[in-house]
Amino acid sequence: MELKVSTRSQAGGALVAITGEIDLYTAPHLQSEFTRLLQDGPSRVVIDMSAVDFCDSTGMNVLLSALKRMKERGGALEVAAPRPAVRKILQVTGLDSVFTVHDEVPKEFLLSEKS
């Protein structure tokens, strides 16, 4: 399955929306997106995982690597809206205590509704 990654920057932060499966074959694409994004230097990155169907250990390692790079710069990387299968992986591996995990995308990262 194809992996789609879109990034929207705003006020020192960035929202990274991921769609598809993160596995051995798609993880390099995600890794290159994080490398590009972290060069821009946002202080806070929120990863919207609401459309991620599957994430294996390779994908988790990409997320951990990005988290480590963010922390080294004094920044934060957070996971938002993981589906039950991804949330279970986070819990089983103990990564739910390593990442800040939000049940939904934080309001400040949502596009404002037009009246």
Image (cartoon, grey):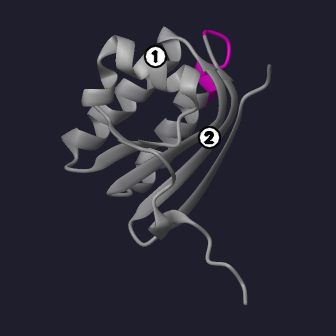
Count the numbered circles shown: 2
Write the residue at 45% across / 59% down.
Answer: 106
The span picked out in magenta is: 24-29
Write the residue at 53% across / 42% down.
Answer: 81
For label 1, the residue is 89
For label 2, the residue is 50
Write the residue at 56% across / 26% down.
Answer: 84
| 86, above or below 68, in the image | above
Packing grade of label 1 (10 A; few <14, some 14-19, many >=20) is: some
| Local SS, label 2 | strand
Write the residue at 47% across / 26% down.
Answer: 87
Q: Position of residue 49 (x, y in %)?
A: 57, 38
Q: Position of residue 37 (x, y in %)?
A: 49, 47
Question: Of the residues under marks 2 and 1, which one precedes in the sequence?
Answer: 2
> Are discs 2 and 1 less than 8 Å apart at CB?
no
**Is 18 on the left-hand or right-hand side of 35?**
right
Q: Position of residue 105 (x, y in %)?
A: 51, 54
| 46, above or below 11, in the image | above
Quarter placement of the N terminus: top right
Q: Amino acid at mark 2?
A: Ser
**Is 41 on the left-hand or right-hand side of 31?**
left
Q: Nearer the viewer, residue 80 or 74?
A: 80
Alpha carbons under labels 2 and 1: distance apart: 14 Å
Q: Nearer the viewer, residue 113 or 73?
A: 113
Q: Amino acid at mark 1?
A: Ile
